[in-house]
Image: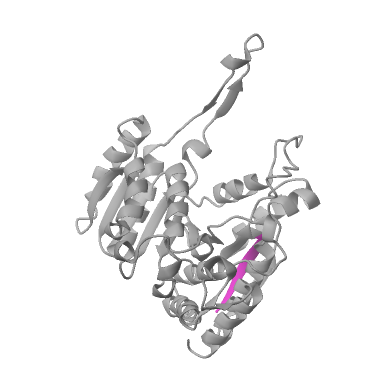
Amino acid sequence: MTKRIVILPGDGIGPEIVMQAVMVLHEIGDKFNHGFIIDEQMIGEVALDAEGCSLPDKTIAKCKQADAVLLGAVGGDPNINRWKNHPTGDRPEKGLLKIRKELNLFSNLRPAILYSELKDASPLKAEIIGNNLDVMIVRELTSGIYFGKKSRVTDAENDEETYATDELFYSKKEIRRILKTGFEIATKRNNNVVVVDKANVLESSKLWREVTAEVANDFPSVTYSHMYVDNAAMQLVVNPKQFDVIITTNMFGDILSDEASMITGSIGMLPSASLGETTLGLYEPSHGSAPDIAGEDIANPIATILSVAMMFRYSFSMEAEAAAIEAAVGKVLADGYRTKDIYTDGFKLVGTSQMGELICERIVNNG
């Protein structure tokens, strides 16, 4: 089996962490007799520098021809903000939003899994975390307030009357397809769904609730409920074990998944998969480009490596390969190795490249 994979290293720590993930990819290929054609393309600030836009047409075309896409990170240094006055209004982050839209990747899966070896790295008390914490957040990805119409009206006579608007838009079709994805995932887990919204205020959330009732009829084995987003944010830190699958909007999912990642000890541990109606998926860590530590060999590559595991599971339907990567990560953590973001006294501090090498060794040696 040969698969074509486009890699988009991107900005900041992106090239470092993607390099380790590609090493893991090749180890899995050797172990399970698979071949990979790796095609590197540009996105983000590096693309703006080289091509004048955050997502070149060539990148889009190559991604559409691929079996899967692996992304590192997008974004420049916010303290410098070199692209504030770009003539087209482009900026690095727009490349990420556009590639999701171009590939029609409407669902974002963000599993927040707490490895038992990292319980001490979680900010929550042990009795709150419990054992085997595993929450799947299913986030709508190509609609909502991030993609709605935006405007600003300036009052020349009274600056205080200047205002800005961001449209929050959802169609029944967009809501239905993300709910269906979440419910299907729940049937392979614990058959429990919480749909997070703000239906006491937002008309769009009321529509989400109506469509949820319709979709739920097709999944009689799944128990579902609704929760306001402010309560969900609180419940994630008070009683995270109550959640199995959370389905929510683009903006709410963005916020809640970052919160959930910190429960696991570090956002450097959180992979993600962006999927559509075909097997083509975009896989990336949930963290940003961290330009302040780029090139220092201290970034945690585990989220990117676990994103490769998700690639095998969701785009290639290769569960054994995915499980082998996850087992190798667990064994390295059990052996006491930690990158700086998850390090505490008594463990073995390693850098980006060494963490990747250690995981590769465990794949070769069956964990």
Q: Residue at the right extreme? A: 50
Is residue 8 highlighted in magenta? yes
Note whether 132 is above or below 76 in the view shown: below
Is residue 66 highlighted in magenta? no
* Whole-percent x, y for residue 177 in the image: 38, 48
Q: Which quadrant: the N terminus?
A: bottom right
Looking at this view, is 22 or 133 the one in front? 133
Does the rendering let one see residue 210? yes
Magenta span main SS? strand
The residue under the point 56% across, 29% down is 150
Tally the numbered discs: 0
Q: Which residues are magenta?
A: 1-11
Note whether 11 is above or below 208 in the view shown: below
* Whole-percent x, y for residue 23 in the image: 63, 77
The residue under the point 66% across, 50% down is 75
Note whether 193 is above or below 356 in the view shown: above
Looking at this view, is 334 or 96 the one in front? 334
* Whole-percent x, y for residue 218 in the image: 24, 52
* Whole-percent x, y for residue 237 in the image: 36, 54
The residue under the point 42% across, 36% down is 170
Does the rendering let one see residue 12? no
Q: Residue at the front extreme? A: 345
In the displayed structure image, the side of residue 6 where residue 333 appears, left or right: left
Q: Residue at the bottom extreme? A: 365
The residue under the point 75% across, 35% down is 85
In the displayed structure image, the side of residue 129 where residue 144 appears, left or right: right
